[in-house]
Amino acid sequence: MRRLFFIACLVISIPSIAQSTKDFLVGGGLDLLKSDYEKPFNKAQFGIEGHYFIVRQFAVGAGMELWTTHQSSSFMMGVRWYPTDKLFVRFRGLIGANDAAAGAGWSQPLKNSFRLEAMGDFYINSTEFALRLGVAYVIKPK
């Protein structure tokens, strides 16, 4: 069964790759919903990130997470794996918040190098869940 799943993922992912090795992806997003929100518009969390594609389907990244209350900022380091063109799985460590987040997202190309992204993350230490919406831009090397 595992072998069949692996083969299916491989067959789906090979022909549907939008980014290339050595591309950069820069973007930002805002949490629309988070499990620790007590009332609407009471606080906000957003992040800015940059990712470098080591291979077509795997990127490493770094960035900042910013909050309007309590914790003011946190450095982020993470990875993304794209099993298909539009779907990605990610893991991020938040240095400063002393937390880690595992999640998945959907990346919809809008025009040329611009993308709209929707993500869901589970924060491991704080046991919170968040839904985020963001935009990203792919920078291709010359």
Image (cartoon, grey):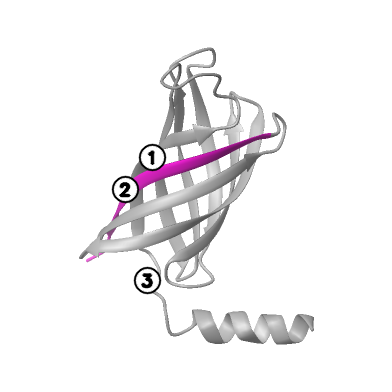
**Magenta-span inclusion, residue 58:** no
Query: Total of numbered circles in the picture?
Result: 3
Q: What residue did someone put label 3 on? A: 20
Disc 2: which residue: 135
Residue at the spot of label 1: 29
Assess whether mark 1 and mark 3 are in contact (beta carbons under 8 angstroms): no
Image: 121 above or below 117? above
Image quadrant where residue 25 sits: bottom left
First to last magenta residue range: 128-142
Residue type at mark 2? Val
Q: Residues within 10 Å of mark 3 (few under 14, many from 20)?
A: some
Q: In the rendered view, would you say 99 is above or below 15? A: above
Query: Residue shown at 51%/30% (left/top)?
Result: 75
- In what quadrant of the picture does the N terminus appear? bottom right
Q: How far apart are marks 1 and 2 (CA)?
A: 6 Å
Q: In which quarter of the view is residue 4 placed?
A: bottom right
Image side of residue 111 versus residue 69, left or right: left
Query: Which badge, 3 or 2, is on the more N-terminal residue?
Result: 3
Specify whether 128 is left or right of 40.
right
Secondary element type, mark 3: loop
Q: Is residue 22 above or below residue 27?
A: below
Question: Is tag 3's residue or tag 1's residue first in the polypeptide sequence?
Answer: 3
Q: What residue type is labelled 3?
A: Ser
Front disc: 3 or 2: 2
**x, y percentage for residue 115?**
30, 57
